[in-house]
Amino acid sequence: MKKFSKSLYSQEAIKEAVKRYKKIADLQMAEKNKYYLVKIKPKKSEHNNFLEDEFGNYVLGLRKGAR
Amino acid sequence: MKFNPDKIDHSTVGFFRYRKLGKEYLLTNDAGEYAFLDENNFGKFIEGKISSKSASYKELAKKNFIRDKINFDKYIEKYQKKHQNLFGGPSLHIVVVTLRCNYSCVYCQASAKGVTSSQFDMSLGTAKQVVDFIFSTPNNNVAIEFQGGEPLLNWPIVKFIVEYAKEKNKIEKKSLELRLVSNFSLMDKEKLRFFFRNHVALCTSLDGPEAIHNRNRPLPRKNSYEETTKWLKQAMDEYRRIERKKIRGKYYFFQPGALVTVSRFSLEHPKEIVDEYLKWGFDTIFLRPLSPLGTAGKAWSKMGYKPQEYLDFYKKALDYILEINQSGKRFYERTASIVVSKILTDDDPNYLELRSPCGAGIGQLAYDFNGDIYTCDEGRMMGYSGQEMFRLGTVAQNVYSEIIDSPALKSMCVASETSCQAGCSHCVYQPYCGICPIHNFAETGNVFCQQPNSLRCIINKSIFDLIFSYLKDKKKKKILEKWAKKEIECSKKNYQKIPD
Amino acid sequence: MQNPKSKINIKENQIVFRLNSKNYPLEAILNAAYVFIDRVYVHLDGDPEKEILISLKGKERLDKKQLEALKGEFLNELLNYLLRIEVAKNNQKIREYIVAASLVSSLPSNVIAQSSRSEEETVDWREDPLEIAVPWEEKHAKKAKEKQKKNK
């Protein structure tokens, strides 16, 4: 489960990332208190070790990027 | 680190971007000026403590890094000159006269069809509409570049467009350039004569010595290298004949050119590829990295490479070329020429892949065989991968104002404006670099890319690092200065009024 | 520059440290983090008003020394961004002026003339669209009548 602080990560960026990752993982997004929560289950077992972290980086990239 | 951001002297520190290269700091500003400072002087500069009598200060002041010494007229003039190409409208018009091709290049991004598929040829009616549309665009400089597939497979339309464009230009009086990009295998004497008589610049693909070229660009049942070089030789001979007899008069004839595509099979042979170009009498080589589009994208695991592999190849080739220049022979590497012309001159060569925004739609347009208009040839190629978002309209139904006003075109401008992109806006190379939103899209599914990860960013940054390190070497700098001058001269010569 | 205390988790291949938001604005932290995402996994937590927790996790296996070096690099990059942000902020108006002056003077003269003409030609001033020439009493009498009609 990946926790994203609402004051540091935008909901928009997380939703965009969830959309992009749908091909390679089953994702569920929720909110709890000051956090957005994303449950990530990779579709391929060989991705288990790093997909959650890659997802975090991707969201950070979207958060930072100009749109 | 020898600076303290809390101690910035706001009255003297003008805007700059920077990067540490080795033991020095490279600074650049919006006008594309650059300066090197050692660690000590960098810290002094930040704190406003650099002596006004020192050589470093004088250089910084001259180049408008010192805020209270900014020469606004000069700064504005240079900034304007660097961006002057943004206002002209598209000048390069890529006309894909057919999708048919007789080659099976391993890295093809053109979505080529078989030689019997004539339904993918541009019709006469469409060709006329394409030329009419091209002449409706506002730029006085117009370059019509025939591409494909293999354009000579639709020779009647190529001939028609050349003649019709010249006829139309008698009234329009634009600076018209005509170019053919072809594998040359279908050339003959009649066509060659036609191209020279009509001042059509010729360009082919030559990936290196026979073994490399044939591996990259197989021609079924034939030797692709022999077919290409047979006509390359004839074109070069004809060009030299014109040069010797000074037949050209006041009009510029273009030396036939060639382009290299560096595939995995090329990486071990930088010197051999350069020697092949020298052998054919070229004075330029353009060592472009492979693009992950089209066939190459699909087969990347087999023919692609990591950025560092390409960069190792590029450095070896460039070092070899610089040695050749040091021995007295003039021979240019085009990527380096373009980069140094942006660094060392007040002009801009208007190379569409290294400008901000990129040339998509506003510097070039691509016209497919059926008259569809795309932001660029890469955008057209994406259309064949099922991504139609780069299609702007058609020559049959849309006028120029509708094309230039399209949301897709505007998105491309925003996505390729380097000062607006994370990772680019603070980059020291921002004044010289460019983004390709289509490459971004091919890599990540998004026209906005996470730049530190992008293939192009890694390659571009490394090439800039290399070039700037060479600019610190007096001998190399002298050579690169000549390249910069030549690049700008060529970019201005490109549009010469060709005779009626 | 401060060297914040850090917590290393060798098993997770991770180093975590805290930064005071007053000294390190969020913009600088985000910019620095962005530079690292091609080679490490970066995660942020905390409150931008008080303290931000930075977690750096190696993509390759790293030892303690290497994780500390990573933190050092991050802090150096943070310093770079503090400087960049300050320089950009301080020179913003000058840059805007330069860009605006360059672009306006690049426009074809007929476009400049057209845009200034279009402002002038929107309304004929003799029609007095803003009712400047209408006397105060007359204007207010008009308004009172309109209000009466509305209330009915």
Image (spheres, grey):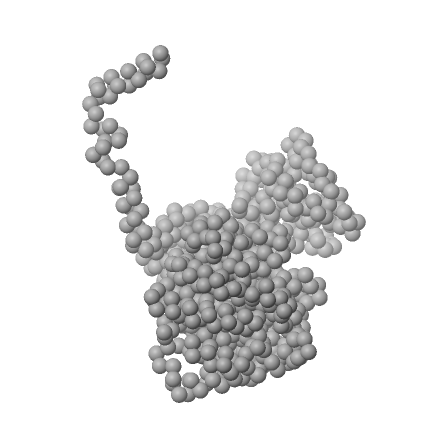
Q: Residue at x 42, y 76 (%)?
A: B198
Q: Nearer the viewer, residue A1 or B24?
A: A1
Q: Residue at x 40, y 62 (%)?
A: B135
Rendered view: B166 above or below B366:
below
Q: Nearer the viewer, residue B31 or C68?
A: B31
Work out which quarter of the rendered image holds the C terminus of chain B and state it.
bottom left
Q: Residue furthest right?
A: A45
Rendered view: B100 above or below A55:
below
Residue B215 is left or right of residue B13, and the answer is right
Work out which quarter of the rendered image holds the N terminus of chain B and state it.
bottom right
Q: Residue furthest top?
A: C152
Where is residue B241 shown, x and y percent of the image? 44, 87
The answer to which image quadrant residue B438 occupies is: bottom right
Where is residue A57 shown, x and y percent of the image? 65, 47
Rendered view: C89 above or below B333:
above
Q: Nearer the viewer, residue B274 or C21?
A: B274
Asked if residue B22 shows in the view, the reply is no
Asked if residue C129 shows in the view, the reply is yes
